[in-house]
Amino acid sequence: MIDCTWIEGDRAFCIAFGSATAACCLALAIPLLWWILPRRRTWFFTSQIDPRQHIQFGYGVFCISMAFTNALCRFIPHAHLAGVHPAFFFTTVGLVITLGPRMLHVASRGRHRKMGSETLAFGDAAR
């Protein structure tokens, strides 16, 4: 079993840790949802995998919910809940590790390939 006692700390640690993990999740959520807007249409996944961007929308909403869960769980004092803070932390780390590199790739590639008002990150035309 993994020792996660380091994740529990005083009030200042909880606020700083909650803010940092919430910021990580928001850094993923905002571009995912921004790229769904009609004038900003960019596929995080290819248009063949997610033609209507439903998966992208789902990940964006999940990242926002994790951001507020991380922040509010740390900001609101409560009794010790065994396993809750480590579960939130590992979920956040999983999101950042799996979506972060792709996010950087799509964002940097989208800056270089613009046609009109649509970003064609994969060479796909906006639908």
Image (spheres, rainbow, N blue to C red):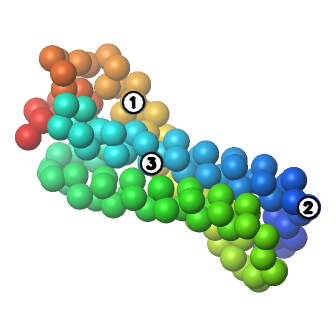
- The residue carrying mark 3 is 29
Residue at the right extreme?
A: 10
Q: Which residue is mark 2?
A: 10
Residue 107 got which mark? Answer: 1
Work out whether mark 1 precedes mark 2 in sequence or the reverse, and give the earlier one: 2
Q: Residue 70's x, y, as percent?
A: 64, 61
Mark toward the start of the polypeptide (3 vs 1) = 3
Horizontal side of residue 106 vs 45, given as left or right: right
Q: Mark 3 falls on what kind of element?
A: helix
- Label 3 crowd (10 A; few <14 / some 14-19 / many >=20): many
In the rendered image, residue 12, in percent from the top left (x then y), is placed at: 87, 53
Q: Which mark is residue 53?
A: none
**Is the N terminus in the top left, top right, bottom left or bottom right quadrant?**
bottom right
Query: Disc 2 residue type?
Result: Asp
Quote the CA–CA distance across marks 3 and 2.
28 Å
**Amino acid beneath label 1:** Ala
Q: Nearer the viewer, mark 3 or mark 1?
A: 3
Place of residue 51 in the rendered image (x, y in percent of width and height, measured from the top left) = 14, 51
The residue shown at (73%, 61%) is 75
Q: Secondary structure at mark 2?
A: loop
> At which x and y percent is residue 99?
46, 49
